[in-house]
Image (cartoon, rainbow, N blue to C red):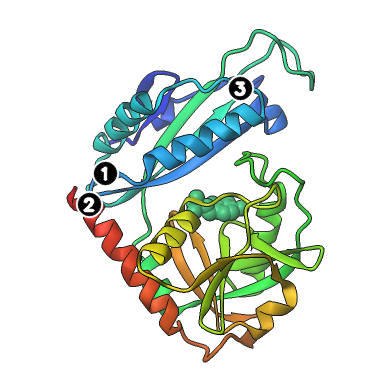
Amino acid sequence: MQQLVYLNGEFIPKDQARISVMDRGFLFGDGVYEVLPAFGGKLFRLKEHVNRLNNSLNSIYITPPYSHTEWEDILTQLVKLQATTADSYIYLQITRGAAAVRDHVIPPQISPTIFAMANPIPTTNAANNARGIGAITRNDFRWERCDIKAITLLANVLLRQEAMEAGTTEAILIRDGQAVEGAASNLFIVRSGVMITPPTSNYLLPGITRDLILELAAVNNIPHKVEPIAAADLTQAEEIWMTSSVREIMPVIHLDGVRVGMGIPGPHWQHINKLYQSFKANVRLS
Ligand SMILES: Cc1ncc(COP(=O)(O)O)c(C=O)c1O
C-alpha cells in the first residue's frame, strides 16, 4: 500500500501530494516543523510538542491553525493509516504558504501549507545507543533564533554532514566558549556525578526529550543542574549524552577522537535510559 500523508486537510498517497513552487517554504525556508514519536500508536508528549509548535509559529507571525484536539485527531489518524504497526515518528511542517510573487515581505493574505507524514523509527537506534556514539565539536555558525524550530536548516545540514564525514554521529556546537547543543539534539554532561544541561535560551532548541529527562531526574532524586556548559567542561566530563525525540538518549563515548570517561556508555546513562524506557512503556500501555 502507498504511504498516505496529510496535506492541507486531506490524507493522500505520498506520490500525489503536491505543493506550489511559489510556496514560501520552498522559496525562503519560511516555515517551522515538529518531530514527535508514536509508540504503539500513542502520540508521545503531544501537548508539549503542540505548545512548542505554537511558540515557533507565533515567533514567525503564523497563526496556529489547529487546536491540541484537532492535532490529536489528525495525527492519530495519520499513524493509524500507515501500513506498519512499527513505532513511528511524525514529521509535521507548516510553511507560510504560496504567494503570488517572490518577495521577502510577508503578504497580508496567505494561507499556510500544512503537511505531516509518519515513518517507522529506525530499529537500529536502540542498539546504536547501547554501543555509544562518536561526536565532534564545531563552531556554532547558526543564527540567533535557535529556539524556533525553523525548517531553514542549512547550517545543521552542513554540521551533521561534517560529523558523518568524520566517522561520527553528531556535532556538539560551541558558541562563545559555551557548548550549547547538538546539530540535531540537546546536550547533557555528567560531572562529579551531577547531570548538567544548559539553560534554554535563543541559542538552543527547548527539546522535549531534554525536558522529560529533567522531569525524570527530579522525580527520581537524580542530582541535576541546569547551567551553562563551557566547552572546556566537555573534556572533563564523566559522561556526555545527546538527546532527541527519535534518537532518544545517545551516550557519547568518544569526542574529537578522544575517549569520554571509560569509553563506554556510563552508569548514569544506564540509569536515565532505563527510566526513559519505562516511561515510554507506560505510554504504550496507556
Ligand atoms: C537543534 C536541535 N536541538 C535539539 C533537538 C531535540 O529536540 P527534541 O527532544 O524535542 O526532539 C533537536 C531535534 O531534532 C534539534 O534539531
Judge from the rendering whether residue 46 lies leftward or rightward of residue 189; answer left or right: left
Furthest residue to the top? Answer: 109
The amino acid on which the numbered mark 3 sits, given as a three-letter code, is Ile
Quarter of the picture containing the N terminus is top left
> Which residue is at 65% across, 31% downward?
59
Q: Are marks 2 and 1 in contact (CB under 8 Å)?
A: yes
Is residue 243 or residue 247 the one in the foreground?
Answer: 243
Judge from the rendering whether residue 238 lies leftward or rightward of residue 8; answer left or right: right
Q: Percent x, y for residue 65?
A: 49, 20
The amino acid on which the numbered mark 1 sits, given as a three-letter code, is Lys
* Pointer 2 residue: 284
User: Which of marks 3 and 2 precedes in the sequence?
Assistant: 3
> Which residue is at 29% across, 57% downward?
280
* Pointer 1 residue: 42
Q: CA distance from mark 1 to mark 3?
A: 28 Å
- Residue at disc 2, secondary structure: helix
Q: CA distance from mark 2 to mark 3?
A: 33 Å
Query: What is the number of the mark on residue 111?
Result: none
